[in-house]
Image: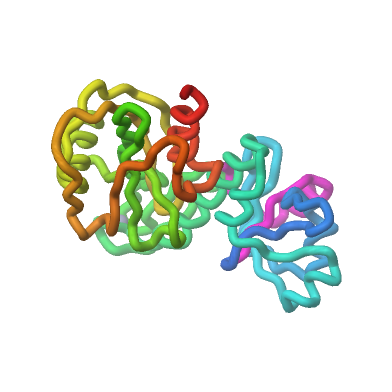
Amino acid sequence: MKLLTKDLLSKNYAEHFALFFTDDGIIVNPQTSSPILQFAKTVKQLKLVVNEAYLDDSSLIINCHSALTPDQMLTERAYINNVKSFLATTNDTVLGQRILRAVHWLTWDAKFQYCSKCGGKIQKVLETTEKKCSSCELSFFPNPFPAVMVLIQRENELLLARSAYFKPGVYSALAGFIDIGETAEQAVHREVKEEVGVEITELKYFGSQSWPFPNSFMIAFKAEYLRGEINIDGNEIEDARWFHLSKLPPLPPSSSISRKLIESVILKE
Ligand SMILES: [Zn+2]
């Protein structure tokens, strides 16, 4: 992800394809259901004000806002979709990953404006994702927080839980952030014990994913149930229960590693 100057943008990238992000989401063409739009043409058509532009491989990531109302946008064959809603509808994993990366950067960039050491204003370094304090010159990078996720299986059942901020009815695998001094495996055992009170065994690595909602790097595992009754902590999660593989509740979006983790078990059975 490289920050581009406006000069460079108009000179070299007018014909490039771009993903356009506003404060409300990602701009999509309703006819093609695609957010991949030609840069200069779209800026003109939708009266977009470009706040900043980045180059991610060969495609542009544009942070912008539009002077048009939603109805005016629709007549120009465009609308703003919530990013998570868009991700739930696309099967294009390369595009999905590009969108996740862009949101990760744009969110971090918007939140991170001042130096944590001296309080000075921080500035972007051209052509990188680095930021530097204008006063003490300390460098900052958009490093995600490491977190773990675990899907616990007991014969033909999965232990799934839900947080209050999930969409109604949706359940997922257990997850939590890694504490200082912990290994990922230790974090899994601790989180499971804290959140649902059971013990697990046969912990196996499944995969990982950078995830911008919020800023985390998720390391996913599978595990077998060992012993104990479900006893939820009531803080981080509001419900947890065993679901038979044939009667699973609504699950997280297909772009998330939690969904891939759960589907890997369903497909195996
Ligand atoms: Zn500083």
Residue 13 image offset from top left, x and y in percent: 77, 47
Q: Quadrant of the N terminus?
A: top right
Q: Give the residue displayed 83% in from the left and 64% down from the top.
A: 77
Residue 19, relative to residue 25: is it above or below?
above
Residue 150, relative to residue 44: is it above or below?
above
State whether residue 228 appears in this view. Answer: yes
Q: In this view of the protein, which residue sits in the foreground, 71 or 243?
A: 243
Residue 247 image offset from top left, x and y in percent: 45, 42
Q: In this view of the protein, which residue sits in the foreground, 3 or 20?
A: 20
Magenta segment: 1-22
Q: In this view of the protein, which residue sits in the foreground, 257 or 53?
A: 257
Q: In this view of the protein, which residue sits in the foreground, 154 or 73?
A: 154
Q: Give the residue displayed 78% in from the left and 57% down from the top.
A: 29
Residue 51 image offset from top left, x and y in percent: 62, 64
Residue 137, relative to residue 200: is it above or below?
below
Q: Quadrant of residue 122?
A: bottom left
State whether residue 4 appears in this view. Answer: no
Residue 261 image offset from top left, x and y in percent: 44, 33
Check residue 18 for magenta coloring: yes
Q: Quadrant of residue 189?
A: top left
